[in-house]
Structures are given as structure tokens and as C-alpha cells.
Image (spheres, grey):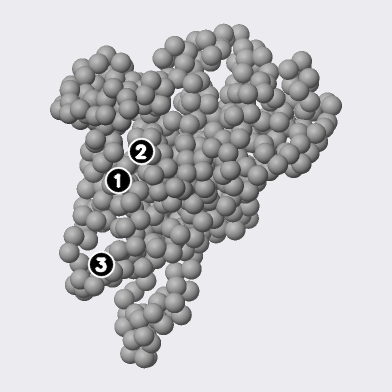
Amino acid sequence: MKRVPWLIPTLYILFLMLPIYWLINMSFKTTNEILGSFTLWPRDFTFDNYIKIFTDPTWYNGYINSITYVVINTVLSVAVALPAAYAFSRYRFLGDKHLFFWLLTNRMAPAAVFALPFLQLYSAVGLFDTPIAVALAHTLFNIPLAVWILEGFMSGVPKELDETAYVDGYSFWGFFFKIFVPTIAAGIGVAAFFCFMFSWVELLLAKTLTSVAAKPIAATMTRTASTSGYELGLLAAAGTLTIVPGAFVIYFVRNYIAKGFALGRV
Amino acid sequence: MNKTVNQKAWFFVLPVVLLVAFNAIIPLMTVVNFSVQETFGDNVFFWAGVQWFEQVLQSPRFHAALGRQLLFTAIILLIEIPLGLAIALTMPRKGPWVSVCLVLMALPLLIPWNVVGAMWNIFALPDIGFLGRLINGLGIEYNYTRQPFSAWFTMVLMDVWHWTSLVVLLCYAGLVSIPDAYYQAAKVDGARPWAVFRYIQLPKLKYVLTIAILLRFMDSFMIYTEAVVLTGGGPGNATTFLSIDLQKIALGQFDLGPAGAMSIIYFLIILFFSWLFYTLMMKDEAR
């Protein structure tokens, strides 16, 4: 192990890539080839599965719906978490510690517990089957996470920065937007990344709160899998396409990702 | 950092509190309502007291699901935490490979959970999946839709695949925060690799490891989508974890009373463990 320290990470990455390769491999095969034979790469290479997804509105609308609620959720979560995280990192106020823990408890609530009550709640306020409903529902676990991450990053910024700015004649909001926000830009990026990630991967609430108009891609996939039988190639192509936005986003935050996973606290 | 007392800070947290309260308190009260009432349909409810709680706590079905859940979470933590730590320790710290490693390792974390389930479902199929073919080719009989052991094996392997990277990234973040001077000092003192790990790296990693255990505990205890897509709780009830059982009762049978009571018990278990971890963690931070 000492001589080849790269062996363990290499083997691990290989293990990570294998199922992904299998999925991509399958997405370029025809249904006949998938069910009829066992091949390590597509012999009968086809783009049909992808063409179907990009031309059939029930498929590509799924992607549009998913991205819509993920973006709304990310913007909303980070926007409201910013001032709250600032308050937690700079001030002491009545019930602050209890409030912070209460926020975190919502990150611990199993989605299965909330699925049915959420359905009733969002039907009652008339938001059922809209991207807004899913975006709002996902704030339940994303806001606490965003507050936690941002608080970590903000606590790393010395308080002298705030005081110097006031001495220089900045108003509070002038300081906040012109000096403080740029200082913790990396933290905001990381928080946004996490909100994006958890909203993008969640399915249970997204599926429960939508039916037709705002159906997320993940739900389109499960419903296709059950209704039209065994269209594995199509399913694999749709699955492959859901990996793309994630890969794209990771690439942008790759330099902050490690620090971000430690919630900005190391 | 010493903080100033400022009650006006409440205005800063107000939007967060309102949004989260709307999402948390109203549904939670709905669940509480279900859990203490009996209904015969038509939205007519009767007071049922703690009847549902007694029923759930005494039912063998709940005990079985809870037992499976605890076993699963224990296996997951025992594999993922040491493995993640080992990978983080052997990962490159400098150079072009760092970004490559980080991006590739983070990839499974950004795949929608049902796609993870579907991907493993296909990957492990005995006839057309790579993994199923491989294991059967080695002469071991493997079929995760029929044998409970195979189903568990696949489930654990899938979770290790999906989430070990989270532990790796957390530990890695802790490791890169250790100043080079520490290592140089250890070198001067002639410390062996084990001593470096035990007295320099491990203390620095304590905090990130706590977060890793906390997150892995919570998320593996709440596992739903991946498991449903992979095995649907089967074969039989072999992989019916708490969330799956809860959904079967709530949406499948529409038994709102027991489902409500079970939700609250379930939530309280997670809350208790998380409070425990959180308290330990904050004690360390205050020190």
C-alpha cells in the first residue's frame, strides 16, 4: 500500500464508474440487443433512445420541469438563508441556539413522513402540480442546510471586517452587499451547489406534489418503466441525461467542493 | 467569536422561520392529528388517544422493519466510514489529479435517487447486468429478486457506491486543512505513519467524522427511493425498511392513524440520535 498509494483511489473510482458505464452502454443499444444478448459495448450502435427523448414533449418537458423547480428552490433557499446565517454567525438573540437546532431537525425529517401531509397542504393552497409547490417543499431541508453551510463560512470571516466597514461610513446593507457577500462568494457557491444537488436528486416529494403539468423527469421515468413495460434503452438514456446537469455543476465548484462538504468549518 | 446581543437579529431569521414553519409545522400537526384520531372515511374523525401508538409499538411488523433498518444503518456506517477514511488518506493532495478525483467521486452524489436505483437494478440483473453476470460467472448463485441475501448484498453495495464519496470528501476536507508544518514536525521527531495518523490526522478529523457519521446515519435511516426502485422491499419483506413500510401503510392501505403514529415514532428516533451527535459535536466546537 505504501508503494502504490494511488491504488485504493483508483480502484474506488473504477468501482464508481462501472455502473455508470453500464447505464451509458445500455442507452446506445436497441431493446433487442439489451434483452437478446450480453454485450460489453453496443454492437448495434443507435441514437434512437436519445432522439426519442429530445423529440417527445412528455420526455423533454420532464427535464424542463425538474430544472425549473430546482432553480427556484436554489435561489429562494440561498436568498433567505443569507441574512439568517449572518444573524446566527454575528449576533446572540433570544432562543438562537434552539432555533438553530430546530432548523436542523427539519433536515432530519424523513420525506416519507411528510409526503401525504404535503399533498394535502399544497392542494389546499392551490399550488398542487406546479413547480412552485415542489420548490417550496424542498426548502424544508435545503434552507436548514444552506443556513448551516453559510453560517460556517461566515464565522470564518473576522468581525473586524464589519467594524472597519462601518467606520468607513458604509450603511449596513451597503456593507452587506458590497463587501460581505463578495467575501463569502465561495460559501454562497457551495450552498447553492448543495441546494441544487438535494433538490435535483429528491424524488418522493417531487412526485407526490405533481401529476401532469409539472411532472419531474424522475417521475416520467418511473411511470414509463411501469406502463410501457421493458423499454430499458430509453430508460437508460433518460438516466444518463439526468447525470449531465450534476456533472456540469460539480465542474464549476470543483475547487470548493471539499471545503463545502465540511460545511465550511475546517 | 464573541457575539453581540442583538434582539433585532430576529428580523434576519424571520423569512427562514416563516418558510420552514409553513413547511414543517403544518404537515407535522397533520401527522399528529392523524395519529390520535380514528376515521371511517368522509373526513369524519374521532378521538382515539394513544391507541395507534400502542398498536404500532406492539406490532411485530414494526419491530421487524425497525430491526432491518437498524441492521442496514449499522452495516452502512461500519463499511462507509472506514472505507471513506482510507480513500481520503490515500488520495493525492496536490497536482492535477486532485480535481479529477474530486469530480469523479462526487458524481454519484448528484444522480437522482431513482436513477441510482434503476442503474443498480439493471447493473445487477442476473441475465443482462454486468454485476449479476460476473457473480454468477464466479459460480455463486446470485439473484437479488429471489434471494434475500443477494438483495441485501446489492442494497449495501449500492449504498456504498452512492454515499462513500460523501465520507471521502468530508475527510479529505479535514486532511487538507492540516498545515504542512505539523507533518514536518512529525518527520523531525521521526514519527511512524501510524503515529502521524493517530496523533495528528485523527484529532483534526474528529469534527468532520462526526458530521459524516451524522449525515450517513440520518440519510441511511431515511432510505426510500433507491431501495424501492431496486427491490421494492422484496423479496417478500426482506428489504422493507421503515420508510418503505410507512409508505405502504400510508399510501398503499391508507391507514392514516397507524401511519401517523409510526411517522412520529420514526421521527423521534432520528431526532434522538441526531441530538446526541449534535450535542457531542457542539461540545467539541465550544472547546
The residue pinned by badge 2 equals A117
Looking at marks 1 and 3 on the same chain, the residue that comes earlier in the sequence is marked by 3
Q: What residue type is labelled 1?
A: Ile
Q: How crowded is mark 3: few (under 14 residues within 10 Å), some or many (20 or more)?
A: some
- Report whether residue B281 is seen: no
Q: Which mark is residue A227?
A: none
Write the residue at 64% across / 36% down: A239
Q: What element carries label 3?
A: helix
Q: Quadrant of the image for the N terminus of chain B?
A: bottom left
x%, y% of residue B134?
Answer: 64, 18
The alpha-carbon separation of the residues under discs 2 and 1 comes to 8 Å
- Residue B8 versus residue A122: which sits nearer the camera? A122
Protein chain holding label 1 = B
The alpha-carbon separation of the residues under discs 2 and 3 comes to 28 Å
Q: Which amino acid does label 2 sit on?
A: Pro
Q: How crowded is mark 1: few (under 14 residues within 10 Å), some or many (20 or more)?
A: some
Question: Which is more foreground, mark 2 or mark 3?
Answer: 2
- Residue A62 versus residue B177: which sits nearer the camera? A62
- Report whether residue A180 is seen: yes
The residue pinned by badge 3 equals B10
Q: Looking at the rendering, which quadrant does residue A22 occupy?
A: top right
Residue occupying the far right of the picture: A44
Q: In this view, does A124 lie to the left or right of B87?
A: left
Q: Are marks 2 and 1 on the same chain?
A: no
Q: Quadrant of the image for the C terminus of chain B?
A: bottom left
Residue occupying the far left of the picture: B49
Q: Is mark 2 on a helix, strand or loop?
A: helix
Count of marks placed on residues = 3
The residue pinned by badge 1 equals B26
x%, y% of residue B11?
Answer: 28, 69
Q: In this view, does A132 lie to the left or right of A173?
A: right
